[in-house]
Amino acid sequence: MRIAVVYASVTGNTEELAEMIQQQFTASSIHVDLFSVKHFPLNCITDYDGIVIGTYTWANGTIPGEMLALYEQIESADTQQLTTGVFGTGDSFFPYFCGAVEEFRDMLYVHTNLAVTMKVELRPQSQDWSKCRKFVDCILEQLEHELQPIG
Ligand SMILES: Cc1cc2nc3c(=O)[nH]c(=O)nc-3n(C[C@H](O)[C@H](O)[C@H](O)COP(=O)(O)O)c2cc1C
């Protein structure tokens, strides 16, 4: 089973959340490849069984520019078998809290097997560990369902 966690982060909040998610996969004895989106090879998307996307939100609730190529690649590649999850950090002071998570969610729901979404207020806190655990469990359940041999 190959899983990648791909994130964008400017001030470190989403990166920290991505690392917490990676640690929860590790706690389940699952290795994941962790990439900043800048280093993720877009043409390798279909090599993975699962892609977990992490994004901050800027500019009136929209997807950051550095995440657009990933968004478009998933939209245009053959990803119907891909299990996905999307998480992000944002600031509820703004009208579109974690708007980029919602934009990704809508696209992933149409083009992939979207398992779960998660939004976190700014820097992750200790209570967010249990959210990360649930998030990872949802992805693993979906992957098991997808990989279930029939007959
Ligand atoms: C100019 C600017 C615009 C922002 N706009 C939004 C927004 O529309 N919605 C939101 O939820 N958060 C917004 N934020 C908050 C960031 O998404 C939040 O600080 C996030 O945790 C940053 O993630 P990072 O530390 O991974 O870069 C904005 C922050 C800045 C600086």
Image: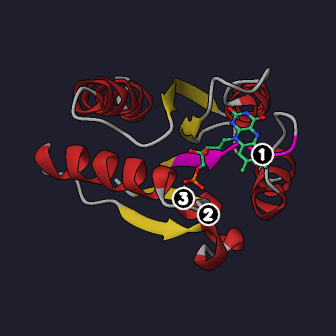
Horizontally, residue 114 falls left or right of residue 147, namely right
In the image, residue 109 above or below residue 50: above
Give me the disc on residue 148.
none
Check disc 3 and report the residue beneath it. 6
Picture coordinates of residue 129, whole percent (x, y): 23, 33
Q: Are marks 1 and 2 in contact (CB under 8 Å)?
A: yes
Label 2 to label 3, Cα distance in Å? 14 Å
Of tags 1 and 3, the one toward the viewer is 1
Distance from mark 3 CB to nearest ligand 1 atom below 8 Å: no
* x then y, percent, for residue 86: 57, 36
Q: Quadrant of ligand 1?
A: top right
Instruction: Please state which of residues 65 and 134 is positioned toward the viewer in this rendering.
Output: 65
Q: Report whether the residue tagged 1 is closer than 8 Å to ligand 1.
A: yes
Q: Nearer the viewer, residue 98 or 75?
A: 98
**Where residue 58 is drawn, which disc sits there?**
1
Task: Look at 48% across and 30% down and name the residue there.
Answer: 120
Furthest toward the front, the residue is 93
Q: Which residues are magenta?
A: 52-59
| Three-letter code, disc 2 | Val
Closer to the observer: label 2 or label 3? 2
**Placement of 108 over or under 27, stated as above or below:** above
Compute the Cα span from label 1 to label 3.
18 Å
Asked if disc 1 and disc 3 are in contact, CB closer than 8 Å, the reply is no
Q: Amino acid at mark 1?
A: Trp
Residue 139 location, x and y as percent?
39, 32
User: Crowding near pointer 2: few (<14 within 10 Å), some, many (20+)?
Assistant: few
